Image (tube, rainbow, N blue to C red):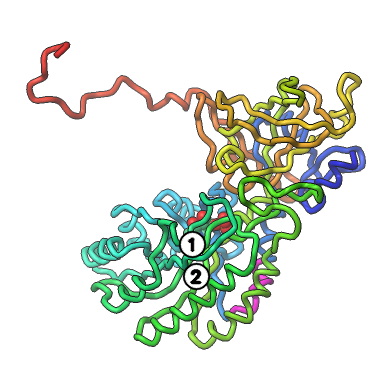
Amino acid sequence: MSAHRTALEGFEPFEYDAQGRLRCQGLALDELAERVGTPLYVYSAGALLERVQRYKAAFAWAPRLLLCYAVKANGHLALLRLLAREGLGADVVSRGELERALRAGIPPERVVFAGVGKRPDELERALRARIYQLNVESAEELSAIAAIAARLGVEAPVAFRVNLALELETHPHLATGTASSHFGLPLDEARALARSLPEGVRLVGVHTHLGSQITRLEPFVEAAQALIELAEALKAQGHPLRALDLGGGLGVAYRRSKDSKDSKDGMKQEGAVPGPEELGAALRPVLQGALEELELTLVLEPGRSLIAPAGALLTRVLYRKRVGGRWVVVVDAGMTELLRPALYGAHHEIVPTRLDAVAPSASPTEPVELDVVGPVCESGDVLGRRLRMPLPERGAVLAVLDAGAYGFVMSSNYNARPRPAEVLIDKGEARLIRPREPLERLWADETNGRPILRLESPKPEGS
Ligand SMILES: Cc1ncc(COP(=O)(O)O)c(C=O)c1O
């Protein structure tokens, strides 16, 4: 019991009660799993909103702050609506995310649009909607924007997304601000482009995004300094800059138990991962004066650090078996529901939702070393490797913690598995915000098809 209590320290909103039942805002998660079935994502509105308040308080020194939630982290409309009510904007990377944000009531003037591959129709929609800014990632994209803006008779507000070529300690797939990354414009190129902006484009901001799951403050400070220098230079050239956009990327402490080792995924996951308070305090000396002087709004695009800890994935134990001296616990969720462990070797704490479900007479009550694996036919379908916990009973429900970000949004139908259900817990009430995907939907659009292209003179069969 105590092992789990320790592992859960700092994992609010998921807490054990005195009877050893894991609860979220008072509601028992095993009961929720019973009602809705598993796999099931559970989010706490309270935990999300608390993190929003922490960000706002941590950056209260900024003359103007625009918090643009990174929709890619978790774009469920119910969550976006909560954030819209808090006055948040959105950082989007596709037309779909833009439509989600607008549909949820996020005003277009609080939307920023990044991404190396924005299609012409996406650019047009963003310009027609009059979003706050397009974060431009290449010279060719800038020309495309200018052409579309000219056709629409509007002036496109753009920010240059610069790649600052920093050294970053995160998983290579999550680093976007390193020299070899394909995101953003090199500083020199951004400066050169600013000297010959095409017609129809107004340079209103400077932007960078370092990457995700960044657990040190120095890269943010370095990036802020570089953006200020760039903004000063561009303003001096007469560009009507109004925003300094530092992107998102602040990490969360996925691995919190004190005896855990750094995972081999390159992410520093233990110990003190800075929160918004530390980030705000580190950036204030660099940014506050300069933002005032240059009359710039500070834009931040947090995703993971807002929503990851507010969510958990509930999954049921199907079978246990011994493989090569260790226990393997087979559960009904896997890489199709939560891809992060398979994709990045990422770690998530996994705990039982009932502590009495780990001590049946036939099972060891002491912690054992075990892997938690999913049902997908891939050897990489492992949700948790070499975890130390008492062997759970068959049928027990486990909670995969910190699963609110890059969880459901990365889920897939591989192995013809329907997407999981989602529940939002708000003010002591659990609401089913997405039912489990019905199986029939998996093949609803599949037909034998109608011809759409034909050879003029078909070759004879077998030639
Ligand atoms: C441009 C941009 N902004 C913000 C984010 C959000 O990052 P995070 O969820 O790590 O805060 C991302 C994620 O990769 C991104 O690409």
| Residue drawn at the location 64% of the way across and 73% of the way down | 59
Q: Is residue 105 visible?
A: no
Please tell me whether residue 79 is drawn above or below residue 150 in the rendered image.
Answer: above
Q: What quarter of the picture does the N terminus occupy?
A: top right
Q: Earlier in the sequence, mark 2 or mark 1?
A: 1
Q: Is residue 207 visible?
A: yes
The local crowd at label 1, few if under 14, some if 14 to 19, many if 20 or more residues have their Cα within 10 Å, is many
Q: Residue furthest front?
A: 324
In the rendering, at what x and y percent does residue 412 appear?
Answer: 51, 34
| Residue drawn at the location 66% of the way across and 29% of the way down | 373
SS class of the residue under badge 1?
loop
The alpha-carbon separation of the residues under discs 2 and 1 comes to 14 Å
Q: Is residue 59 magenta?
A: yes
Which residue type does callout 1 highlight?
A: Gly
Tell me the magenta residue range.
55-62
Please tell me whether residue 364 is drawn above or below residue 73 in the rendered image.
Answer: above
Q: Residue furthest top?
A: 462
Which residue is tagged 1? Answer: 177
Q: Is residue 75 magenta?
A: no
Please tell me whether residue 407 is drawn above or below residue 191 in the rendered image.
Answer: above
Dot label at residue 276: none
Left or right, 259 with reference to 293: right
Which residue type does callout 2 highlight?
A: Asp
SS class of the residue under badge 2?
strand
Q: Give residue 142's quadrant in the image.
A: bottom left
Q: Give residue 82's quadrant in the image.
A: bottom right
Which residue is tagged 2? Answer: 245
